[in-house]
């Protein structure tokens, strides 16, 4: 089954196609040429934003469509960045977001640097069925240094619980064994089967 992935993030597309190996699912980007204008992410939760993305892709294409909304919750910042993870800094690039996060956490001690990645997936298969919804998370902490060049987003400053490596130091297949996205996707596959 082919599923349109409502994202402008090529890292997400790559991860979903790796996670989907052997499942009979294949994720197709909503726009190969970047010509699509995405709706604003006005939701107050990861779920609301994932639904906005899935609805948009489904109404545009009429085909099965999935939205992923994800982000970081940092305890020392009282649960920020949440739904604002991608727009945390003014420039909204991965590098500027990471720099702002490290700056805001400069004074935070090691033991208080706990955080988690969260992901909500919404899959619309056709207009007569309610959407499928799945959520996943990954506990960890925010490092003081930037390390690694794999993955995307905040991976260079996130250390998964129990790991000595930053997420961006993990090979793709290692990240895909533990990530918030992988955990959500497993639950979604269970519902689909
Ligand atoms: P789309 O909305 O087009 O899907 P996006 O990157 O803007 O792409 P989100 O709105 O879901 O995605 O924002 C998620 C933010 O959290 C963004 O800054 C990502 O880089 C970051 N993020 C999500 N999953 C991540 C992961 O696995 N590793 C590192 N950062 C991640």
Image (tube, rainbow, N blue to C red):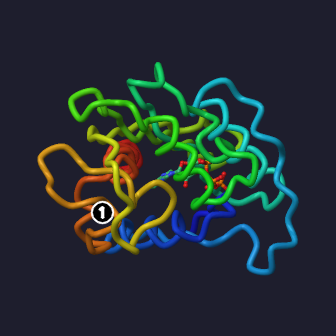
Q: Is residue 6 above or below residue 86?
A: below
Q: Quadrant of residue 82?
A: top right
Residue name at image x 44 percent, y 35 percent? 105
Q: Quadrant of residue 23?
A: bottom left
From the image, tell me which residue sits under label 1.
176
Residue name at image x 74 percent, y 79 percent? 32
Q: Is residue 190 above or below residue 175?
A: above
Q: Is residue 108 above or below residue 186?
A: above
The furthest residue to the bottom: 33
Q: Is residue 19 left or right of residue 93?
A: left
The furthest residue to the top: 78
Q: Position of residue 6 (x, y in %)?
A: 67, 57
Q: Helix, strand, or loop for circle 1?
A: helix
Q: Position of residue 77 (x, y in %)?
A: 47, 25
Residue name at image x 73 percent, y 39 percent? 52
Q: Nearer the viewer, residue 145 or 35?
A: 145
Q: Position of residue 84 (x, y in %)?
A: 64, 36
Q: Position of residue 39 (x, y in %)?
A: 83, 46
Q: Is the CB of the residue bearing disc 1 within 8 angstroms of ligand 1?
A: no
Q: How many marks?
A: 1
Q: Nearer the viewer, residue 193 or 36?
A: 36
Packing grade of label 1 (10 A; few <14, some 14-19, many >=20) is some
Residue name at image x 39 percent, y 31 percent? 107
């Amino acid at each position: 089954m082919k599923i349109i992935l409502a994202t402008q993030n090529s890292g997400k597309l790559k991860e979903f196609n790796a996670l989907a190996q052997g499942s009979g699912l294949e994720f197709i980007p909503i726009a190969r040429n970047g010509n699509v204008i995405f709706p604003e992410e006005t939701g107050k939760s990861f779920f609301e934003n994932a639904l906005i993305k899935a609805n948009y892709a489904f109404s545009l294409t009429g085909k099965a469509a999935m939205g992923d909304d994800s982000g970081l919750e940092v305890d020392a910042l009282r649960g920020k960045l949440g739904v604002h993870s991608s727009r945390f800094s003014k420039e909204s690039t991965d590098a500027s977001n990471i720099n702002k996060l490290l700056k805001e956490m400069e004074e935070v001690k090691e033991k208080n640097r706990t955080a988690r990645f969260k992901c909500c997936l919404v899959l619309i298969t056709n207009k007569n069925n309610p959407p499928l919804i799945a959520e996943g998370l990954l506990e960890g902490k925010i490092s003081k240094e930037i390390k690694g060049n794999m993955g995307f987003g905040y991976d260079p400053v996130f250390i998964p619980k129990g790991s000595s490596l930053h997420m961006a130091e993990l090979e793709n297949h290692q990240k895909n064994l533990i990530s918030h996205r992988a955990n959500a996707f497993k639950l979604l596959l269970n519902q689909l089967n």
